[in-house]
Amino acid sequence: MPHYHTLGQIPRKRHTVFRRPDGGLYSEELMGHEGFVGTSSLLYHIRPPTTVISARRIKPIIWEADQDTSLRHRHFRTAGIPAGGSPILDRRLLLFNSDIAMQYVAPTVNDTTHYRNSQADEVVYVAEGTGKLESVFGTLPVKSGDYVVIHRNITHRWAFDFSAGPVKLLVMESHGHVRTPKRYRNEFGQLLEGAPYSERDIQRPMQLEPHDEAGEFPVLVKQYNALNELVLDHHPLDVVGWDGYFYPWIFSIHDFEPIVGRIHQPPPVHQTFQGDGFVICSFCPRPYDFDPQAIPAPYNHSNVDSDEVLFYASSEFMSRKGIEYGSITLHPDGLPHGPHPGRAEASIGAKATNELAVMMDSFRPLHVAKAAEPFEDLHYHKSWLDTQNGAFAPPTS
Ligand SMILES: [Fe+2]
């Protein structure tokens, strides 16, 4: 989506003869969103992408909501979620609605099969981990702090280096197309000078290694709220070249340039991505407000028409008993939230914050998943009463 890119070999004109070394035709495929009017790319496969040996539905994917729907602020500790399994198949659902879902997984093994999500875009925030994403569009190196944007239908496989340390992933599945905020772009699609990042910060696939292999290759496909297995008669990553606007890409949270002011700036200055029915924001280390009378801590606010979710992404930042690295808080619509006791006073004159957090604001109500229940801190909604926690420095959401 960010801008036009091309990799590998492509014919001079689209939809024209393009031959393999053996004289046969490469198979051209258009992949994009919104039919033929959204962003798209043209890929050139060694073999037709349509040759399916067998197809079966493996299992339904049922998202079950917590029955406790009382209105309160909530807190979940992802540190309590056991590590293990696959980066795709062992994701634990935490929050969801029809626009956006948030899942968490700390995988310990790579998948042998390839996967594609044909019903949602995925934004995978790599809280910890080193490795690469192998996709039909080529390979992307992956590191901690990366937002990996995998648009729907892109066949891929994660290849993490587990010997380099643990892997922790916050996965957001979006029904709509994930994109840069419209207000960051000019009428030509270029990111504006005032935007907190530029095209240069977008990492695109730069390495393409087409696999010319026949055989039986299963691909797992999420579609219609079910997991399916399609067995192809060839390796799915057999693309020799492509061009267009539709491909997986990465933006690192560490490349976000914070916008600061003399007095407190509202959360929209931290916006990083736009989706349908939600936004994703990044709270990064930055100087605090520089007016001597400024109160850098956020004022109390009622997030009208918005459920606000924060993932605490730094192990260095947490200073409050009860909130920790990996914590996820949900501040729902209909309840004000704000600084904890003593925090507003303590923030006056502070020069900088070292916070790192990912925020997802959903404009429709979020369900808490039943699978999140075991990891909930049931006392969080009373934490504003607790004067023992005056040193708390929450992200300024
Ligand atoms: Fe907030």
Image: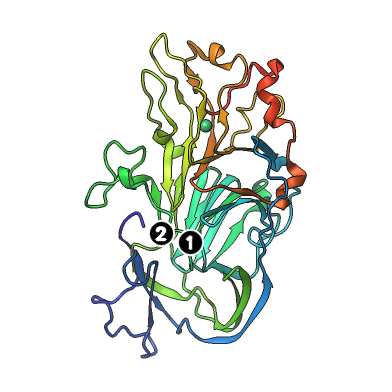
Q: Position of residue 189 (x, y in %)?
A: 26, 52
Q: Is residue 343 above or below residue 55?
A: above
Amino acid type at image mark 1: Thr
Q: What residue would you read off at disc 2? A: 206
Marks 1/2 in contact by CB < 8 Å: the verdict is yes
Query: Of helix, strand and loop, which one carries label 1?
Result: strand
Question: Outermost residue, top direction?
Answer: 292
Q: Does residue 397 show up?
A: no
Q: Is residue 19 above or below residue 143?
A: below
Closest to the observer, 131 or 88: 88
Amino acid type at image mark 2: Met
Q: Which residue is depicted at the point 53% across and 59% down?
A: 133
Q: Which residue is depicted at the point 42% across and 9% down?
A: 293
Q: How is the image coloured?
A: rainbow
Q: Quadrant of the N terminus?
A: bottom left
Q: Which residue is depicted at the point 40% across and 31% down?
A: 258
Q: What residue would you read off at disc 1? A: 139
Q: Position of residue 260 (x, y in %)?
A: 38, 25
Q: Residues within 10 Å of mark 1 (few under 14, many from 20)?
A: many
Mark toward the start of the polypeptide (1 vs 2): 1
Closest to the observer, 324 or 107: 324
